[in-house]
Image: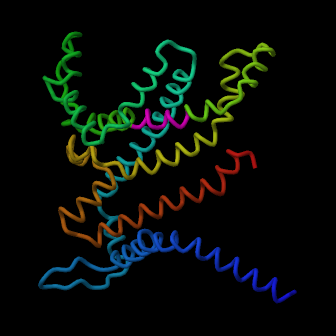
Amino acid sequence: MARSIDIDRRRKAVYGWLLLLPAGVLLSLFAFYPTVATFWSSLFSRGTRRRPSEFVGAENYAALFNDPTFWTVVQNNLLYTAVTIPLSIVIALVMALWANSRIPARSFVRTAYFTPTVLPMIAAANLWLFFYTPGLGVLDQIGRVFGFAPVNWLGQPDTALWAIIIVTVWKEAGFFMIFYLAALQTIPEDLREAADIEGASRWTYTRRIVLPLLMPTTLFVMVNAMINSVKLIDHLFILTKGGPSDASKLILYYIWEMAFAFFDAPRAAAMTMLVLLVLCVVAAIQFFLIDRRTHYQ
């Protein structure tokens, strides 16, 4: 009897490992190995034909911390993240609440909100390039009606990053709206009826019932927005290429530039490891702190 139980346990263990094997292979090939290889590459100097690559330890990281351009890019990315994440979430929530209400042409409104999401970022950037073109763009044409002078939105350090932020928010808000809209449709109608019986206003119902029930969705959207704030750089290639004077350059664009324009792969690997470290810290905060409070554990 005991031997039969032991065989059954071993069989279940084998089945479990076989189920985990595909995910383990994929993670090893496309996550764990690239991470280890990138870290190992960051510990070497840039090699040339005359001078081969040498082990330098943490010199690439020290050089980054002493690089003024790196800190400019970090500041740009922090501002970009601090603005795009809350603004995209708030706009997406407002659009979802409106698109979920009983309004005329509700399907058309939902489609209009979601349309920017289906556009590739390159196409969206080209569209906004038409808006931002000095003197000829839509924004300057509208401003001319009210007597404003033309503005080089993408060519001035004070406005370039904000122009990039507007494109990102416009592109992402409709995508996040879909998640909120799906979450709103799972809220039982009985809660709304009970709130009406108690005499609660629409704002009270939204603040006391809807928003707390949407917190898991908000956490999911926030994590996706955080990842997108690091990985979205397509529009930079079309709109500013990180200029002028690095005013709109973001960290992933700088990594690409360092690796493929300056051919300094070890320095790019060091920046990549720093980005991974920050994302790991954010993930830890999410799983061990925010997630429990969001799900009321």
- Nearest the camera: 54 or 97? 97
209 relative to 217 in the view: left or right: right
Q: State the image quarter where residue 160 is shown.
A: top left
Above or below 252: residue 39: below
Expressed as whole percent of the image width and height from the top left, the position of residue 240 reads: 21, 42
93 relative to 158 in the view: left or right: right
Expressed as whole percent of the image width and height from the top left, the position of residue 287 reads: 63, 56
- Image quarter hosting the N terminus: bottom right
Q: Residue at x 59, y 41 (%)?
A: 217
Above or below 24: residue 99: above
Q: Which residues are magenta?
A: 172-180
Whether the magenta-drawn stretch holds residue 175 is answered as: yes
191 relative to 72 in the view: left or right: right
Q: Residue at x 37, y 64 (%)?
A: 272
Expressed as whole percent of the image width and height from the top left, the position of residue 259 reads: 24, 65
Q: State the image quarter where residue 187 is shown.
A: top right
Q: Residue at x 48, y 29 (%)?
A: 91
Above or below 117: residue 66: below
Whether the magenta-drawn stretch holds residue 248 is answered as: no
Magenta residues: mostly which secondary structure? helix
